[in-house]
Amino acid sequence: MTQLAIAQIFKALGDPVRLQIVQRLSNGAALCLGELSKDLGISRQGARKQIQALVSAKVVQLHPAGREVKVQLDATTLAQSRAFIIALEAQWDERLQALKQFTEHG
Amino acid sequence: MTQLAIAQIFKALGDPVRLQIVQRLSNGAALCLGELSKDLGISRQGARKQIQALVSAKVVQLHPAGREVKVQLDATTLAQSRAFIIALEAQWDERLQALKQFTEHG
DNA sequence: CAAACATGCAACCAATTGGTTGCATGTTTT
DNA sequence: AAAACATGCAACCAATTGGTTGCATGTTTG
């Protein structure tokens, strides 16, 4: 995982509309573009752009089916973002631990 | 945690420069603005803006000390973003589980 | 086949972002 | 007190983003 790819994932998640889309997908059944675009407070084409942003970051995959296009969460991408944060936290904890050692024995 | 606050955290993490800053902070000792701004490929003021973005999202805290300003990671904010992703994944897994039940007994 | 439906594509626009430069201000150091 | 250091503030700029509208295209349904 390159730093840039991770940044793109976070960037994709860094918008309330896109976050809501992702939540809907994790929640309910497989949704197509049209359904997913409803009740977001923006136009269908606006929503489509946001979904495309999620596709580019691989947070989501598109599966054409007849006249509609199903949208599916990509769990591996979510897992990667989670792993990154957990790694950060681990480093941070290590550092705190080292600092504690230092103050105790210094 | 409001949806918007979470989105702001992800947005803050959604940039390679800011991501690198966060990693440096999790890695090393407490850094001041000046040190943190080095080797990012941008000017000090440019870096300062990025750091401010992290402050606004509460990914990072500033602690003035004399003529310099120390920058510190906010572990609770990282934890919140981690919790959000994990919650998403949990919902997703639940859904897959339900789907499996359905196909088995349907 | 015609109507309705789901989507795609492109042009356009305002607001935000990511970066710059120049200069001012407060704080150590010598 | 003067020099060096760490930072702040503001104006400015190009590129990206988030949204719109209008229209075209392929796919079901009646």
Image (tube, coloured by chain):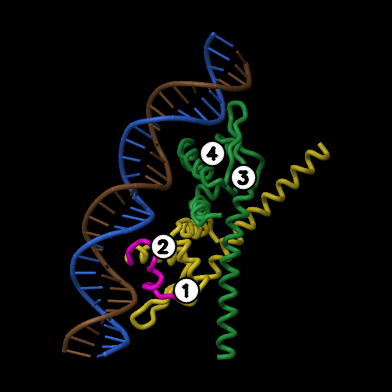
Chain colours: A green, B yellow, C blue, D brown
Chain under numbered label 1: B
Element type at mark 1? strand
Which residue is label 3 attached to?
Answer: A73
Magenta-drawn segment: B31-44
Q: CA distance from mark 3 to mark 1?
A: 34 Å
Same chain? Circles 2 and 4: no
Which numbered tag is attached to residue A38? 4
Crowd tier of the residue under label 4, counting other residues whose Cα lies within 10 Å: few below 14, some 14–19, many 20 or above: few
Which residue is label 2 attached to?
Answer: B53
Chain under numbered label 3: A
Mark 3 / mark 4, whichever is N-terminal: 4
* Residue C13 coordinates in the image, percent (x, y): 30, 40
Crowd tier of the residue under label 1, counting other residues whose Cα lies within 10 Å: few below 14, some 14–19, many 20 or above: some
* Residue B5 coordinates in the image, percent (x, y): 50, 59
Kind of residue sitting beneath label 1: Gln
Camera-side mark, 4 or 1: 1
Crowd tier of the residue under label 3, counting other residues whose Cα lies within 10 Å: few below 14, some 14–19, many 20 or above: many
Q: CA distance from mark 2 to mark 1?
A: 14 Å
Kind of residue sitting beneath label 2: Ala
Element type at mark 3? strand
Left or right of A54: which side holds C12?
A: left
